Image: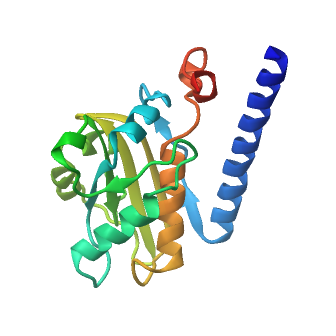
Amino acid sequence: MKNQLRTTRSAGFKLAASAVLLGGLAACANDTVLRPVQLDNYDPNDLFYLAGKGPVKTQVVGNPFDEAKPEVDSATTSVMTGATFRPKLTFQIEVPPEQNSPYHVVMLLDAPGNARPEKLCANPEDANRSASSKTGEDKLRVVAVYCVNDRRLSSIAGTTARPASSSDPRFQKLIQQATLNLFPLDNPDRRDSNRLWRAR
């Protein structure tokens, strides 16, 4: 029975890994390019705490579109919601006080090329203002950071051909892929203790 369970879990991980690979290939085909995720003390088992707590507080910084900022914020978090493997997470700009937690996400839109993800957790607005070199006008770059308090747990950056609006499939694909890869199933640096499928 144990061998069967181990085989099932292994097969599940292989399928998930294949999904990431196929998703990455599809993203490249649609002019969406993601850099490898950066992990700092990331523990995938914390995601169950997040899912049980309620919506994850999300700060969307920047507005690359000719739209009201609340509309862009809402469109961004709507695409992010459900874009994780498991558990499925919900993302919101504002969360009720009783659902507050030290975990939060920062999504920097139209991010400068020299934006430093490790600085975004503490003060994303200041980090955005202090960065100077913007991505070329033909590209939109985003940086997503998963934080606990002021500390980065994971981050990822990606670019796509500049979308026309927050409803543009190119923008939605970039946000979806960034969210998916921001919360991987595993942290290779802590593989002996932090595999998600061992905990659940």
Q: Is residue 84 left or right of residue 54?
A: right
**Residue at position x 27%, y 72% in the image:** 63
Q: Is 19 above or below relative to 47?
A: below
Q: Is 193 above or below relative to 144?
A: above
**Residue at position x 52%, y 74% in the image:** 170
> Residue 151 location, x and y as percent?
28, 32
Q: Nearer the viewer, residue 26 or 45?
A: 45
> Residue 173 location, x and y as percent?
54, 67
User: In the rendered image, which quarter is residue 17 located in?
Assistant: top right
Name the colouring of the figure. rainbow
Quadrant in the picture for the C terminus:
top right
Q: Is 172 above or below relative to 21?
A: below
**Residue at position x 46%, y 34% in the image:** 48
Q: Is residue 11 left or right of residue 122?
A: right
User: In the rendered image, which quarter is residue 77 located in?
Assistant: bottom left
Q: Nearer the viewer, residue 101 or 125?
A: 101
Q: Is residue 86 left or right of residue 63?
A: right
> Residue 199 location, x and y as percent?
57, 22
> Residue 184 location, x and y as percent?
55, 39
Q: Total marks drawn?
A: 0
Quadrant in the picture for the N terminus:
top right
